[in-house]
């Protein structure tokens, strides 16, 4: 029972991170109908940027860990947003209206580039930072096993919730959200009506990257280690979360993220940790085959 | 009793297609006569294309029955089939139960699309060859005989090419046989799509706005082509069309839809006088002026292609 | 006027430099490496950072200066007819191993035949196989390495188990992979294109994880080795009296096995090429291309799209299975690390860069992508320039990624625009020959 509770907490933490990445997938898919395969690598890149900034602030400027982390987080959001802005400009913008697989192939190329770019510039090995901010709250004690909840975990869940609420507000209430929804329905028509489609799409990529950077920084905080091949598997899992939640839906992405996080940790605990990735990949295949519109998405009707 | 009821090739009974809250086709029944050109008309959004999609298996209708036979459509047989769980008895087909490719191959129904769907990058000749793919692939022994290049395969391929060339001659595109279909002028693409549908050897040819975007001379040529196809007696035609001059000139029977419902059904002369039809069309006059309509269609397709 | 242009170019270059500076900081400006306490420490690399910024400035500056003029319309490139190219290539490929042995001696030739000959030919075979699925049928398969793995493991497991030689096992490997292709393809082929791609990726990862963890059968990460290798129609390539060399009265040389493997792979690759070229002109191949162009129109013409997709998927997998078997023969061991997603991505890049439709393009891309990085490895002086841990393989994938992006951006219809009709009315000799040749480029209106 204690173990189950602990895994539940761990699963929700992990799931929040997946959810933050998944929002990036789901928004881009919603607006230009493209699977942004490179998004997982953008997440990995952001974790590296946060890591370097953290080291820079603590070692060179001598900041304390907590303020350094906050500054690194914000700066990483900005720099990752710039990256994704450039990526969209270089790799995807021309491809709108090209044949349907072109953006995906380009994104696969971009993903390969990013993973190897980081390998080349930072080396292929694990980079780990000393654990920081390790205080925990004991939820149960005295039993066979103490169930703990760390402040980091609380932070991760709270940040995820707050960001989801904020972006939900943006999409529902602001002119950016209206423009996004207009482009989603019919980009050509939206352009005719004066929506700046390029700007809207670019902003979507920027927001997606900023959220990925939050996820990357929190991932670094929670697990303390990152390497250049870390974009692929979390990326696919976050995409799974987006699909499971219903691609195109913001709350769906977070819900899917939580589910994938829980499935993964519980599967790892009770079945086999060697096969824990199989669980996520199977969920992906099964969802796409049997319910491609996910839990909260709209069905995709093929118009003839 | 009118001709199309005596010897129908297609009978649609109480067909309904619902998209969420929208009844795109609402309890429509009609028959199309063998050897006739039957026109399906109605204002924009009336549900004509949706009805075609139900006929050709692209949509599963919400309810209703679509009976079809290239031979003779017999009420008793339809009844027996309907009560059984089968899709067809080899002669009579219940289209609402069949998959799209079966409908083309077994029931012999062919269609074109409102927004032309040619294989743009492939040559005109190849487009017509693909329409004969089923027979050809049998002749190629599912590729094994073809891979060896045996004479029986070569003969079959030659015959298919000749048939395709016959159609290219007929639509005046022989010279451009090897050019990509996407590079042909718009009117030629429309005719090529019809020729391609004809190469599947259909008993009923369903055309979705074939005259859209054509100029007067081209529309006239198209009307002649369709009349020619009908007069050969092998193929009946079901035609969606907004261009009333074409409809009135060539059709034997007109069915009118409005808001998913059938509002009139009869000979062209009867339908033209029908008050309900006049009301339906007058109500949307500014949209349905054929010239405007054609221009709009052409524009939409031109920019969308 | 030129001053204005100059100013504009300067302004644009300034912006580009700022962006590149933002992108390169901190990922290029610093490198985190563990120090002797095993704590990460930053190593500044500001010169490199400045080089990047300077490069961005100059590049953007001169691009702006030059691109000011009106866009020039480039005439469609017409490939010259080169009827002698096919036979010439064939002759070159045939004498290659013998020539290398004659020039370098049997010892030094080994590497050239194995790494540059056999390895590249296996990739060519893989490229041609995937080209059927992706280039012709337009089904994006991101899990191609899984079928490759099935072929390799099938040989490594079945050879010791059944005692069959590779002649018998070669088709078995192909068929097993095709069977897997069939089973995986069956449920997913009705999905839309990008979902299909992702599901193939998921399946391939599952296969790889199973290979890693199913120790009893696959020996996990360590992989399988010690299975029977190549023999010449029953004669093993061993020094003893029963070996190939003794039987033909030749002195034993290790390179003999490599030469035989080279010819084996060459013959199989040419066979695959022949089958691809012929299939393209048969109803099946034409249906694949039609499917790539417009699936809905295919359905309206009575094509059973599911079966057509299945055959493309399974045939592509078949080629991968054959290639996997050859891989096992070449390496002498198989392990899961050879069948990662980056392997799938590399093969996909070969097809994409090869321009999809054209067989020769795929072969050239394979030679370039695989051969170039091996060549870079040879150039030891690069290590002294870039440091001791310089690994050209990393740069290869980096460049592969960029090349895929560039290809999609500058030849977006590259996958379909270079095609010659599969059947023509006018005199075929007036058009480009498709016999191993690049296909004539016609300006297809899109
Ligand atoms: N797949 C679909 N999902 C939802 N609604 C649909 C779908 N297909 C058609 N509709 C709706 O059904 C109605 C009828 O459309 P349909 O295309 O059949 O009209 P139509 O008579 O062909 O019009 P037009 O003359 O403009 O071609 C329209 O309101 C349309 O929006
Ligand atoms: Mg319509």
Image (spheres, rainbow, N blue to C red):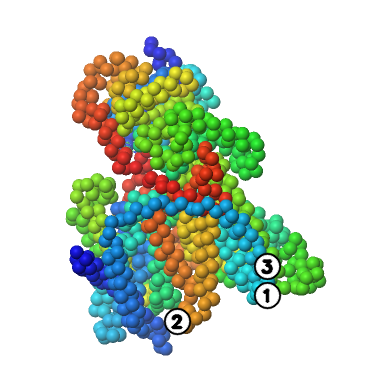
Above or below residue A87? Residue B185 is above
The percent coordinates of residue B69 (x first, y second) are: 48, 23
Q: In which quarter of the view is residue B212 placed?
A: top left
Q: Which of the marked residues, 2 or 3, is nearer the chain's N terminus?
A: 3
Mark 2 and mark 1: Cα distance apart in space: 31 Å
Q: Nearer the viewer, residue C437 or A118?
A: C437
Seen as rendered, the residue at the extreme front is: C1
The percent coordinates of residue B198 (x first, y second) are: 46, 29
Mark 2 or 1: in front is 1
At a point 23% along the width and 17% down the height, the residue shown is B275
Q: Chain of mark 3?
A: C
**Crowd tier of the residue under label 3, counting other residues whose Cα lies within 10 Å: few below 14, some 14–19, many 20 or above:** some
The answer to whether residue C186 shows anywhere in this view is no
Q: Chain of mark 2?
A: C
**Crowd tier of the residue under label 1, counting other residues whose Cα lies within 10 Å: few below 14, some 14–19, many 20 or above:** few
Question: Regarding mark 3 in the picture, which secondary structure is present there?
Answer: helix
Question: Regarding mark 1 in the picture, which secondary structure is present there?
Answer: helix
The answer to whether residue C132 shows anywhere in this view is yes
Mark 2 and mark 3: Cα distance apart in space: 35 Å
Q: Which of the marked residues, 2 or 1, is nearer the chain's N terminus?
A: 1
Above or below residue B134? Residue C37 is below
Provide the residue designation for mark 1. C105
Question: Regarding mark 2 in the picture, which secondary structure is present there?
Answer: helix
Provide the residue designation for mark 3. C98
Provide the residue designation for mark 2. C385
Q: Are marks 2 and 3 on the same chain?
A: yes
- Compared across the picture, whether B235 is left or right of A73 comes to right
Q: Chain of mark 1?
A: C
Q: Are marks 1 and 3 on the same chain?
A: yes
Q: Are marks 2 and 1 on the same chain?
A: yes
Mark 2 or 3: in front is 3
Q: Nearer the viewer, residue B303 or C300?
A: B303
């Amino acid at each position: 029972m204690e173990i189950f509770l602990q895994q539940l907490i761990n699963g929700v933490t992990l799931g929040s991170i997946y959810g933050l990445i998944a929002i990036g997938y789901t928004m881009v898919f919603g607006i230009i109908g493209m699977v942004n395969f490179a998004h997982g690598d953008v997440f990995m890149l952001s974790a590296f940027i946060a890591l370097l900034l953290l080291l820079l602030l603590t070692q060179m400027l001598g900041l304390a860990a907590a303020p350094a982390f906050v500054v690194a987080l914000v700066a990483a959001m900005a720099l990752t947003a710039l990256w994704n802005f450039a990526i969209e400009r270089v790799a995807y913008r021309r491809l709108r209206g090209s044949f349907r697989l072109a953006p995906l192939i380009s994104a696969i190329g971009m993903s390969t580039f990013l993973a190897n770019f980081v390998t080349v510039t930072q080396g292929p090995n694990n980079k780990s930072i000393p654990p920081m901010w390790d205080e925990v709250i004991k939820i149960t004690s005295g039993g066979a096993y103490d169930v703990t909840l760390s402040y980091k975990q609380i932070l991760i869940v709270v940040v995820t919730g707050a960001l989801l609420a904020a972006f939900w507000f943006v999409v529902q209430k602001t002119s950016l959200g209206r423009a996004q929804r207009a482009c989603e329905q019919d980009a050509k028509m939206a352009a005719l009506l004066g929506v700046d489609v390029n700007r809207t799409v670019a902003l979507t990529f920027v927001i997606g990257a900023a959220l990925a950077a939050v996820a990357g920084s929190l991932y670094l905080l929670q697990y303390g280690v990152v390497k250049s091949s870390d974009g692929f598997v979390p990326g696919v899992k976050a995409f799974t979360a987006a699909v499971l939640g219903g691609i195109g839906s913001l709350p769906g992405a977070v819900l899917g993220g939580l589910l994938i996080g829980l499935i993964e940790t519980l599967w790892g605990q009770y079945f086999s940790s060697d096969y824990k990735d199989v669980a996520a990949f199977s969920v992906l295949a099964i969802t796409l085959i049997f319910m491609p519109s996910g839990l909260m998405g709209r069905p995709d009707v093929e118009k003839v | 009793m009118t001709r199309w009821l005596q010897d129908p090739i297609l009978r649609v009974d109480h067909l309904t297609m619902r998209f969420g809250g929208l009844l795109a086709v609402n309890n429509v029944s009609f028959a199309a006569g063998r050897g006739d050109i039957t026109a399906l008309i109605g204002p924009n959004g009336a549900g004509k294309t949706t009805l075609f999609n139900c006929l050709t298996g692209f949509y599963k209708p919400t309810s209703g029955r679509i009976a079809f036979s290239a031979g003779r459509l017999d009420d008793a047989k339809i009844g027996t089939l309907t009560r059984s769980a089968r899709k067809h008895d080899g002669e009579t087909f219940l289209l609402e139960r069949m998959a799209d490719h079966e409908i083309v191959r077994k029931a012999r129904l062919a269609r074109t699309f409102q927004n032309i769907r040619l294989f743009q990058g492939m040559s005109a000749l190849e487009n017509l060859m693909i329409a004969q793919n089923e027979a050809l692939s049998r002749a190629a022994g599912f590729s094994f005989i073809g891979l060896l290049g045996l004479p029986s395969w070569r003969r079959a391929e030659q015959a298919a090419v000749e048939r395709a060339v016959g159609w290219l001659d007929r639509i005046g595109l022989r010279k451009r046989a090897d050019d990509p279909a996407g590079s042909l002028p718009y009117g030629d693409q429309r005719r090529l799509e019809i020729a391609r549908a004809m190469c599947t050897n259909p008993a009923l040819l369903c055309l979705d706005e074939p005259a859209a975007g054509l100029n007067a001379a081209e529309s006239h040529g198209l009307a002649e082509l369709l009349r020619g196809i009908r007069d050969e007696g092998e193929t009946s035609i079901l035609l969606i069309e907004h261009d009333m001059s074409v409809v009135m000139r060539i059709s034997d029977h007109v069915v009118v839809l409005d808001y998913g419902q059938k509002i009139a059904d009869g000979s062209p002369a009867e339908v033209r006088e029908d008050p309900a039809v006049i009301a339906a069309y007058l109500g949307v006059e500014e949209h349905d002026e054929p010239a405007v309509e054609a221009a709009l269609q052409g524009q939409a397709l031109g920019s969308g292609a | 006027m030129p001053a204005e242009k100059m100013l504009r170019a300067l302004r644009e270059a300034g912006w580009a430099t700022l962006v590149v500076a933002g992108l390169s900081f901190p990922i290029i400006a610093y490198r985190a490496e563990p120090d002797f306490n095993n704590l990460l420490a930053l190593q500044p690399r500001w010169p490199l950072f400045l080089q990047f910024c300077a490069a961005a400035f100059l590049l953007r500056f001169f691009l702006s200066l030059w691109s000011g003029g009106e866009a020039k319309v480039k005439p469609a490139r017409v490939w010259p007819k080169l009827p002698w190219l096919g036979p010439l290539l064939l002759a070159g490929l045939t004498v290659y191993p013998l020539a290398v042995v004659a020039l370098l001696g049997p010892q030094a030739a080994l590497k050239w035949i194995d790494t540059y000959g056999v390895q590249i030919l296996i990739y060519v075979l893989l490229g041609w196989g995937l080209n059927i699925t992706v280039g012709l049928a337009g089904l994006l398969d991101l899990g191609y390495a899984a079928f490759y793995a099935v072929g390799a493991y099938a040989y490594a497991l079945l050879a010791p188990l059944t005692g069959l030689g590779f002649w018998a096992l070669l088709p078995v490997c192909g068929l097993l992979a095709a069977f897997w292709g069939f089973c995986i393809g069956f449920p997913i082929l009705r999905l839309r294109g990008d979902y299909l791609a992702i599901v193939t990726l998921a399946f391939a990862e599952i296969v790889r994880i199973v290979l890693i963890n199913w120790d009893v059968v696959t020996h996990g990460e360590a992989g399988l080795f010690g299975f029977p290798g190549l023999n010449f129609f029953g004669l093993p390539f061993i020094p003893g009296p029963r070996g190939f060399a003794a039987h033909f009265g030749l002195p034993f040389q290790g390179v003999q096995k490599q030469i035989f493997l080279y010819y084996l792979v060459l013959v199989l690759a040419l066979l695959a090429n022949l089958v691809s070229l012929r299939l393209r002109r048969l109803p099946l191949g034409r249906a694949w291309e039609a499917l790539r162009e417009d699936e809905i129109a295919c359905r309206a013409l009575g094509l059973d799209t599911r079966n057509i997709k299945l055959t493309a998927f399974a045939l592509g997998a078949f080629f991968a299975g054959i290639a996997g078997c050859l891989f096992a023969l070449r390496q002498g061991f198989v392990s899961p690390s050879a069948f990662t997603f980056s392997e799938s991505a590399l093969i996909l890049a070969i097809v994409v860069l090869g321009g999809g439709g054209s067989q020769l393009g795929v072969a050239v891309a394979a030679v370039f992508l695989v051969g170039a990085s091996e060549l870079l490895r040879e150039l030891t002086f690069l290590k002294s320039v870039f440091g001791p841990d310089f690994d050209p393989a990393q740069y290869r994938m980096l460049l592969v990624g960029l090349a895929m992006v560039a290809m999609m951006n500058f030849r977006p219809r590259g996958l379909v625009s270079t095609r010659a009709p599969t059947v023509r009315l006018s005199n075929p000799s007036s058009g480009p020959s498709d016999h191993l040749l690049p296909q004539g480029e016609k300006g297809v209106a899109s």
